Amino acid sequence: MWVLYYCLATVTLLAGGGGAEPGSAAGGKDMREKTSRQADAQGPVKTDKMPPLSEAEKRIILDKGTEPPFTGEYWNSFEKGVYACRQCGALLYLSDSKFASACGWPSFDEEIRGAVRRQPDADGQRTEILCAACGGHLGHVFVGEKLTEKNTRHCVNSASLVFTPESKWRLQRAIFVGGCFWGVDHLFRQVKGVLRARSGYTGGTTEKPTYEDVCTGTTGHAEAVEILFDPRQATYEQLARLFFEIHDPTTVNRQGPDEGAQYRSAVFYANDEQKQVAEKLIGLLKDKGYKVVTQVVPATTFWPAEEYHQDYLNKHPGRSSCHVRVPRFDTPAK
C-alpha cells in the first residue's frame, strides 16, 4: 500500500512542473480517448506518421503534467508489444519490461537502450524522464523500491505513449550461441538497430534453468543471447556475420577457456529466412577454408538468465571479454 500512496502523492508534487490535478481537464474522457493514439498497423510507429497532439496530451507531454492514476489507457495493460513516444514515435519500452506496481500508471523497470533521458525534476525531489529523441515528458523514475529484480520503476503517463502489439510490429528476434554470453551480449549491444540483447539459456529440456543447472552440463542448454532488432536499421545477415566473427565457429563445445556443451556454437533460427542466411554464411566460411561446426537448429524456448548476468561487462568494467572480432568474411581464403 505504501507504493500506491507514494504514487498518488506524485500528482500533487509538481511544483513548477505544470502538473494536472485529478479531476482537471487533463483527466477524464480526453485522457481516455484513443482516436489519435493508434499505432501504424504495419509496425512500430514512425516519427513522420504521428498525428498532432490533443490538448490533453499537450498538457502532459509539453507542459509536464500528470494524468490522474488509474485513468490512463495503459496502466493495467500487459499485451505483448512495444511502447513508443506519442509525440515523435521513438521506441521507448518493450512490454516484457512492464510490471504491475499497483500505482495507477504504467510501470517499466527498463527502457530500450538510449531511449529515455533523466534529469532533476522542477520540484527538486524527483527524477524526471523524457523521450531522448524529442524531449517529451514521460513521467518520473524511482530507484530502490525493490519491486523487481532491476529495482527500478519508470512511472509513465499513458498519454505519453502509443502501443503497437507484437503481432503488428516489424521488430525481429535472433538467438545466437557462441560461448560465454557475457561477451556476445556486450558486442551485440553496440550495434545500431539492436534494441535489446539479453543473456539466457536455450536448447535444453529443463524448464526455467538456473546458471548452476546449466553449468552441470546435464540440462542440454547453451549460454545464449537473444537479440531484438529493428530490421530497418540492422539486417539479420549483418547480425549473423558479426556472430561468426566474434566467436570461433570451428571449435566443438568450447570457446576460449570455457569448455562444455553449454559453450557450443549454434544459430537458433526463428524462420526459414534466418536458416538460409546462416547456412549461406557457413558456406562462405567453408569456402575460405574454415572447418565450421556451428549448429543451425530451430529456435526453442529462451529462458532469460539471472539479472546479474545481464549487461555483465558494462557492470564490471574491470573484466575483459574473451570475444574479439576477427574479420573472417573480408579476408582471403586460406
Image (spheres, rainbow, N blue to C red):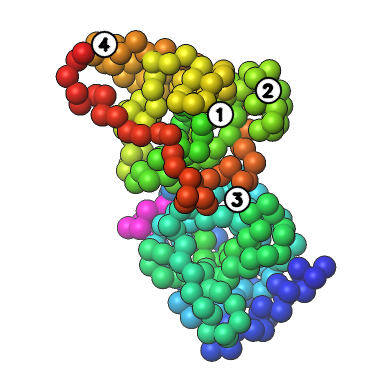
Query: How many other residues sit within 10 Å of disc 1, few (<14), some (14-19) or many (≥20)?
Result: many
- In the rendered view, tell whether residue 144 sits above or below residue 12: above
Residue 216 vs residue 199: left or right?
right
| Image mark for residue 170 | none
**Residue lying at 38% horizontally and 63% vertically, measured from the top left:** 133
Query: How many other residues sit within 10 Å of disc 2, few (<14), some (14-19) or many (≥20)?
Result: few
In the picture of the structure, the residue carrying the numbered disc 1 is: 223
Query: How many other residues sit within 10 Å of disc 4, few (<14), some (14-19) or many (≥20)?
Result: few
Q: CA distance from mark 4 to mark 1?
A: 27 Å
Label 4: element kind:
loop
Residues in magenta, as a range: 45-50
The picture places residue 160, in percent across and down from the top left corner, at 52, 66
Q: CA distance from mark 2 to mark 4?
A: 34 Å
Q: CA distance from mark 2 to mark 3?
A: 30 Å
In the picture of the structure, the residue carrying the numbered disc 2 is: 216
In the picture of the structure, the residue carrying the numbered disc 4 is: 289
Report the front residue among 190 and 319: 319
**Residue lying at 26% horizontally and 29% vertically, measured from the top left:** 327
- In the rendered view, tell whether residue 332 sits above or below residue 148: above
Which amino acid does the dot numbered 4 rest on?
A: Gly
In the picture of the structure, the residue carrying the numbered disc 3 is: 97
